[in-house]
Image: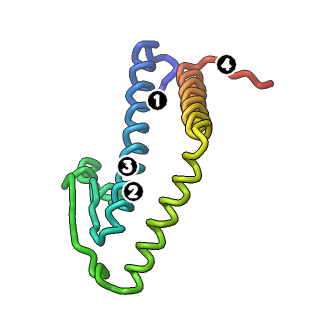
Amino acid sequence: MLYRVWPEWLRLWVYYASWYTLNFLIGAAIVRLIVWFMLFHIGLDFWIFPNYFCDDNNPLAAFWPLLEVTLRSDKFDPFMTVVRLASAFLIFQTSTEFLKDPKNLDELFESSSEMINEMYDWGHDRFMGIPQNTT
């Protein structure tokens, strides 16, 4: 309410708090998925923030418990063993092909850094009420 009449320092503080909270939430979701996928291949369900996507009245409940480890019920299933081995092989093969040319990794980091900077600048200008270029 009445965001335009807030002092600039308060708008800036709210923007920074929102930006870094959003980055933490997105980063945590990506890290937890990568860790789960790596440990899926050895037959474990390992979750960082297991209630992360749980809709509850208390938002802090999404971050408790911190970790959960369970043995998958299909750990010794022959079909799932083949799926895990095929998946691990495909990940290894794709990573090897991608990393053969060091330019690929540099371009990936450069483009992701550029995208984050553009999103930050756009959000900062929008949040602070700086007129946007319409060209």
In the rendering, at what x and y percent does residue 108 appear?
Answer: 58, 38
- Circle 4 is placed at which residue position? 131
Q: Helix, strand or loop at disc 2?
A: helix
Residues packed near mark 1 inside 10 Å, few (<14), some (14 to 19) or many (20 plus): few
Q: Residue at x 29, y 72 (%)?
A: 43
In space, the residues marked 3 and 1 are separated at their CA atoms by 35 Å
In the rendering, at what x and y percent does residue 56 appear?
Answer: 29, 58
In space, the residues marked 2 and 4 are separated at their CA atoms by 38 Å
Q: Residue at x 60, y 28 (%)?
A: 118
Are discs 1 and 2 less than 8 Å apart at CB? Answer: no
Are discs 2 and 3 less than 8 Å apart at CB? Answer: yes
Are discs 3 and 1 less than 8 Å apart at CB? Answer: no
Say which amino acid is labelled 2: Leu
- Circle 2 is placed at which residue position? 33
Say which amino acid is labelled 4: Pro
Residue 31: give its label: 3
Residue 1: give its label: 1
Q: Is residue 86 above or below residue 123?
A: below
Q: Quadrant of residue 67?
A: bottom left
Task: Report the front residue among 52 and 83.
Answer: 83
